[in-house]
Amino acid sequence: MTSPAADRPASEIPPLQPPPSSPPAPVARRLPVAVWVALGIVYVVWGSTYLGIRIVVETLPPFLSAGARFVTAGLILAGLVAWRQGPAALKVTPRQLGSAALVGLLLLVGGNGLVVVAETAIPSGLAALLVAVVPAWVVLLKAATGDRPSLGGTAGVLLGLTGLGVLTLPGLSGEVAIGGVVLVVVGALLWAVGSFSAGRIPMPASPFTASVYEMLAGGLAGLGVGLLRGEQHGFDPSAVSGRSWAALAYLVVFGSLVAFTAYAWLIQTAPISLVSTYAYVNPVVAVALGALILNEALTWSIVLGGAIVVAGVCLIVSTERRR
């Protein structure tokens, strides 16, 4: 999964409203090349994290590797924030710290952690498509709190859940481990709860500062869960493959730092309608990379279910962002 604070659904990010006296914006404005470069990074890097996780867990324990990833990334990001903005930028209130820690636990232990464990048993592309239903869960959570979805949002949720049903067929038929499918579905639901909660509790004002504490809390808890599961028993660092170490380093540097920085810059620079397209591009990238690099099979259920899910997410994003 993506970097914690960066995966907030587009419908949860309030659009910037110009003051009444502002002149109308130009009908057409050419976006700078940097916007397309940053968007490409978010598309490819976040889409490739599922492949990276699949390679990591080939020879590394799931929760211990995930915990180490986020603790390392959190410490590096904290250093960068303190260097660029001064140590005061990391100062938060106790309530903000508690809120960030809670979101980090939901996103990284419940969401990302379960996906990492699941990818020891199911293909990375299938995991990415199951996670892609997160915007549908968020719409349902909003509806449960009195925020009725639009007609398009409702149709998108129905499409997404239909696609989810098709994607679970390989598990029900025994083609893949049903336990892995269930873990990803539960993880995606917890990720949605974390994303939904982040906009409704007192979080740090800076997304970078919030991400530091989310990653540190989630990473430390992930290490604790790994130790409780006994992942350290029989673990031999010398038996870890070079490509698993390389994939872990890739997830730390690119998945948790570079892509998040690009996303945080994009939501301040580019139209949110453009930035939010990552929600349905990432799973397509993940499926393509899994098939090309790991030779993961593209079964009819993955192709059909994936197409339905992506269509549903596209409909949700395109309608909910206008509300």
Image (cartoon, rainbow, N blue to C red):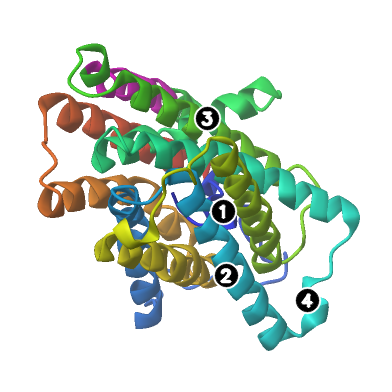
Residue 189, how many percent across, how many down? 52, 29
- Quadrant that contains the C terminus: top right
Q: Which residues are magenta?
A: 155-169
Q: Which residue is mark 4?
A: 89
Under mark 1, the amino acid is Pro
Under mark 2, the amino acid is Gln
Tell me the quarter of the picture where residue 75 sits: bottom right
Residue 22, how many percent across, how many down? 67, 72
Q: Spatial distance from mark 1 to mark 3, Cα to Cα?
A: 15 Å
287 or 148, which is in the foreground?
A: 287
Under mark 4, the amino acid is Ala
Left or right of 283? Residue 185 is right
Residue 155, how many percent across, how many down? 40, 23
Q: Which residue is mark 2?
A: 268
Name the N-terminal-most of marks 2 and 3.
Answer: 3
Q: Spatial distance from mark 2 to mark 3, Cα to Cα?
A: 27 Å
Under mark 3, the amino acid is Leu
Tell me the quarter of the picture where residue 86 sits: bottom right
Name the N-terminal-most of marks 4 and 2.
Answer: 4
Q: Secondary structure at mark 3?
A: helix
Q: Secondary structure at mark 1?
A: loop
Examine the structure image and report whether residue 167 is included in the region drawn in magenta. yes
Q: Which residue is mark 1?
A: 4
54 or 312, which is in the foreground?
A: 54
Q: Is residue 199 visible?
A: no
141 or 322, which is in the foreground?
A: 141
Of circles 4 and 2, the one toward us is: 4
